[in-house]
Image: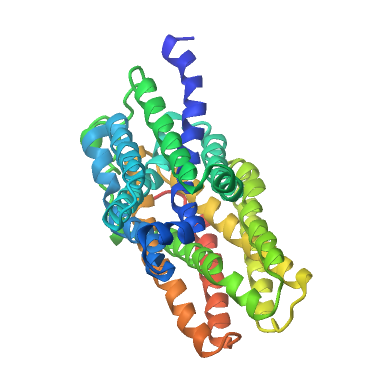
Amino acid sequence: MSSTMRKMKWMLPVILLIGFIMRSPITTLPLMLKELAVNLHVAQSQLGILTTLPLIMFLLFSNFASVVLNRYGFKRAMIFALGILTAGSFMRLIITMPTMLLGTCLIGIGIAHLNVFMPSLVTAYFPNRIGLYTTLYSFAMISGNAIFNLITAPVAKALGWKAMMWLLVITAVLALVSWLLISTWLPEKIERNQSGVKGPDKSNIHVWNNKHAWPFLLTFGGQATMSYTFSAWMPTLMAYHHVPAEIIGVITASFAFIGLPISIFLPQLLVVFKQRGKSLLIWSAGLCGIIAAGMLFIQNTSSITFWMTESLLIGYAIGVFFIFDMTMFAVKTDNPYATAKLSGMAQAGGYLMSAFGPSLYGVAFAANPTGNLQNSVYLALVLIALVSSLIIVRIKQI
């Protein structure tokens, strides 16, 4: 076994660290908006932009991340993304409105690139273990999100809310330093313009004009719109039905945690299963989503069982559609650059869809909290994700 092959085992902790910071810098800050508002001497409502900015960055930069990868290769492109994320995290330690806004934008830009780079990195360095390494970074991403959400309140109470900001910085620095260390010996797997690709050059694929690429966008957009809208409004909807506040916290946590077993088992199953097996998994998510949509039409209850079931069904459907799309980016393409272009296109379009979800739901909620309009739209999103995913199953390769 060569020295480089022996060193490849060190990719595991680095991939886990990178996955750990691909959501937590975005989802942790909203838990501290009250304290932040006091320090900035502004109303808490004025800080809602801090939760929207990362989504806008995803929308603006995802489609262009493959250009950075093609120009600089994996090693420097990853340093670029992690460096921007780390710089943004440091900037948010300076508690002023301009630095919080700019820091959050930089974090969003860094993560937008990582979202595109990671499926491509798996394709490049682990082409025969796509399921395993997709599992690793997906699990790390979801668990990092859940862990930081769980520790924010006790850490803030014991050490102050700024201690959590420092934890986010330290995690980002560890990921950057770890990548810098392994990049000194890591072979470059992507050359500019993919000159090393043999056979038909698919690296220059025009994904926006490719009919086989659009189902990836619709699947990603459908699940992202459901996910961000649920996270933003389901607690308010449950409160409207007089569900106790402490129970609302438990129910919303269940929505996050159901993604953990999905991220562990699903990528491997998707790689192993044939077309029929993949279709059955997708149908299971679609049926859970449809049942959850049906429940929303009869939601006038404060039953804890009802809302916990709703949360778990939605969480399962969203989790399966998300992991399926992220895994198929690598499985359905034959070189890292094509993977990056496909995932960049799907995420840019998908985040454009999801960016409107919470605000439009808010308008519908204000008009009628239990209205059938928003429930019908949710059902339509489930059906879009279901049909698009089934089409992806039948696609041999982009």
Residue 60 picture location, percent across and down: 28, 58
Q: Quadrant of residue 55?
A: bottom left
Position of 163 relative to 233 (above/below): above
Q: Which residue sits at x=49%, y=66%? A: 222
Q: Which residue sits at x=36%, y=45%? A: 93
Q: Nearer the viewer, residue 153 or 270?
A: 153
Residue 207 picture location, percent across and down: 31, 55
Position of 189 relative to 117 (above/below): above
Position of 302 relative to 351 (above/below): below
Q: Which residue sits at x=31%, y=45%? A: 91
User: Is 14 left or right of 287, judged from the image as shown?
Assistant: left
Q: Is residue 270 visible?
A: no
User: Is 185 left or right of 320, judged from the image as shown?
Assistant: left
Position of 365 relative to 235 (above/below): below
User: Is 210 left or right of 174, judged from the image as shown?
Assistant: left
Q: Quadrant of residue 317?
A: bottom right
